């Protein structure tokens, strides 16, 4: 055991002492909103496969077809020999979907945020970085040790005050259109106007909006065409497969191709991933019925919970938090739900602020009304 190993062991011990040590649990997605875990079938209120596309045959078939036709690997980084005609065609499709001049693929959303935000901060010495208090961990990775001027969650009055107080110099605002632990939406129109008024670059993470919200499911940035400087999103949630995109001006994408380390020095996404994304882009724009079903599920659940006095925060999307405040309560509620055949993750600090522990309910088109009623009935009876 080296000195490093003993530090690793100490960290794990400390986590255990705080009841925060985690481990991996084998789980199988079964389709129809169900999963299998520990020999039991559970209704899945945890995963982000909002439109049920992760088990759609068209995605799996095209993924397999492209792997068989083009091979399992892409051979090299994009600037070497890794750019196939399919990469370019899909990036053009994404740009059209998002209503931007250009787009670029990355292996995952985490890797994209870590690499792209870092590349933007590096481009502009002295840039001031304004971030929502609840931004995703991948954005913190991209910000690294750059000083963040943090505004209260979705509080754009606060952002405006901070922008005014720090007048002068280049500015970058980073936020999300839908927050993964709250299910609330940012006011993109006002954000864009604020960014413009203060000459700031606006960076928007649409991980949970892509496929679900906005015209054709293209995200909330589609409501204000050309107003958001950079939009990113992932194919791993509602799009049902894997990979991520960044979309924006030709200038922005050209800069990233030349100066973003996480793009330059990483092997190009493989054909199987591209095939699934291509199929998802065929299906998602036309899934208006599914998007309406999902919105209806969420509205029904919030109505049932709110009329019983349960706090669902500012949720207005497919993500509905059941806020119970104490961490132990969230954990106990999640365990009690599992015993009743339903899976919902307890979310505790440090993922959310102290005193706001919750169950995070992620709804899906594949849930039945009976699934929602069963969940609501249990929560109303057990959340006090
Ligand atoms: C899931 C998520 C990501 C990361 O995307 P992956 O493709 O899963 O790596 C980035 N930002 C937010 C807000 C997310 O919820």
Image (tube, rainbow, N blue to C red):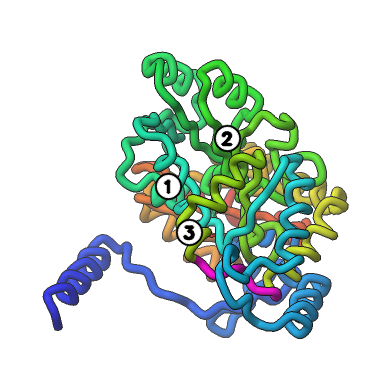
Decide: few, some or many residues near mark 3? Use Cα within 10 Å; few <14, some 14-19, many ≥20: many
Per the rendering, the mark at residue 118 is 1
Q: Quadrant of the N terminus?
A: bottom left
Res 313 → quadrant: top right
Decide: few, some or many residues near mark 1? Use Cα within 10 Å; few <14, some 14-19, many ≥20: many
Res 17 → quadrant: bottom left
Seen from the viewer's position, the closer of residues 37 and 66 is: 66
Seen from the viewer's position, the closer of residues 20 and 334 is: 20
Q: Is residue 4 left or right of residue 90?
A: left
What is the secondary structure assignment of the residue under circle 2? loop
User: For the point 61% across and 34% down, which residue is it?
Assistant: 229
User: For the point 72% across and 29% down, which residue is it?
Assistant: 224
Q: Is residue 271 magenta?
A: yes
Per the rendering, the mark at residue 262 is 3
Region in magenta: 266-272
Dot placed on the residue nearer the N-terminal end, 1 or 2: 1
- In the image, residue 364 above or below residue 62: above
Quarter containing ligand 1? bottom right
Dot placed on the residue nearer the N-terminal end, 2 or 3: 3
- In the image, residue 223 above or below residue 88: above
Q: Position of residue 296 (x, y in %)?
A: 78, 45
- What residue does disc 2 label? 314
Is ligand 1 less than 8 Å from the beta carbon at label 2? no
Label 3 to label 1, Cα distance in Å? 9 Å
Label 1 to label 2, Cα distance in Å? 30 Å
Asked whether the residues under the numbered discs 3 and 1 touch, taking CB atoms below 8 Å apart as contact, a structural biologist would say: yes
Query: Magenta span: helix, strand or loop, mainly?
Result: loop
Q: Position of residue 304 (x, y in %)?
A: 67, 44
Q: Is residue 339 magenta?
A: no
Seen from the viewer's position, the closer of residues 347 and 1 is: 1
User: For the point 13% across and 79% down, which residue is it?
Assistant: 2
Asked whether the residues under the numbered discs 2 and 3 touch, taking CB atoms below 8 Å apart as contact, a structural biologist would say: no
């Amino acid at each position: 055991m080296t000195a490093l190993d003993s530090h690793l062991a100490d960290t794990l011990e400390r986590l255990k002492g705080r009841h925060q040590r985690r481990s991996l649990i084998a789980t199988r997605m079964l389709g129809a909103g169900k999963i299998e875990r520990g020999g039991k079938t559970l209704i899945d209120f945890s995963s982000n496969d909002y439109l049920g596309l992760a088990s759609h045959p068209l995605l799996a078939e095209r993924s397999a077809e492209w792997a068989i036709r083009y091979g399992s690997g892409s051979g090299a980084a994009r600037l070497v020999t890794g750019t196939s005609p399919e990469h370019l065609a899909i990036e053009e499709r994404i740009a059209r979907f998002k209503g931007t001049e250009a787009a670029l693929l990355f292996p995952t959303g985490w890797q994209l945020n870590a690499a792209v935000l870092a590349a933007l901060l590096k481009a502009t010495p002295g840039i001031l970085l304004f971030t929502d208090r609840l931004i995703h961990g991948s954005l913190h990775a991209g910000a690294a040790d750059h000083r963040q001027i943090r505004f209260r969650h979705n509080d754009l009055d606060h952002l405006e005050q901070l922008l005014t107080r720090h007048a002068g110099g280049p500015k970058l605002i980073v936020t999300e259109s839908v927050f993964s632990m709250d299910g609330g939406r940012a006011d993109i129109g006002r954000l864009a106007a604020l960014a413009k008024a203060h000459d700031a670059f606006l960076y928007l993470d649409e991980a949970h909006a892509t496929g679900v919200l906005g015209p054709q499911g293209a995200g909330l940035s589609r409501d204000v065409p050309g107003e958001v400087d950079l939009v990113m999103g992932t194919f791993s949630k509602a799009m049902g497969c894997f990979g991520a995109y960044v979309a924006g001006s030709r200038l922005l994408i050209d800069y990233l191709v030349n100066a973003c380390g996480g793009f330059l020095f990483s092997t190009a996404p493989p054909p199987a991933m591209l095939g699934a994304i291509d199929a998802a882009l065929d299906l998602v724009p036309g899934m208006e019925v599914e998007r309406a079903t999902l919105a209806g599920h969420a509205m029904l659940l919030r109505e049932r919970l709110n009329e019983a006095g349960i706090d669902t925060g500012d949720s207005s999307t497919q993500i509905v938090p059941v806020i119970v405040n104490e961490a132990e309560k969230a954990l106990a509620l999640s365990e009690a739900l599992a015993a009743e055949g339903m899976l919902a993750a307890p979310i505790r600090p440090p993922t959310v602020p102290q005193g706001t522990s919750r169950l995070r309910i992620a709804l899906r088109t594949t849930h039945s009304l009976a699934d929602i009623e069963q969940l609501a009935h249990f929560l109303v009876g057990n959340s006090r």
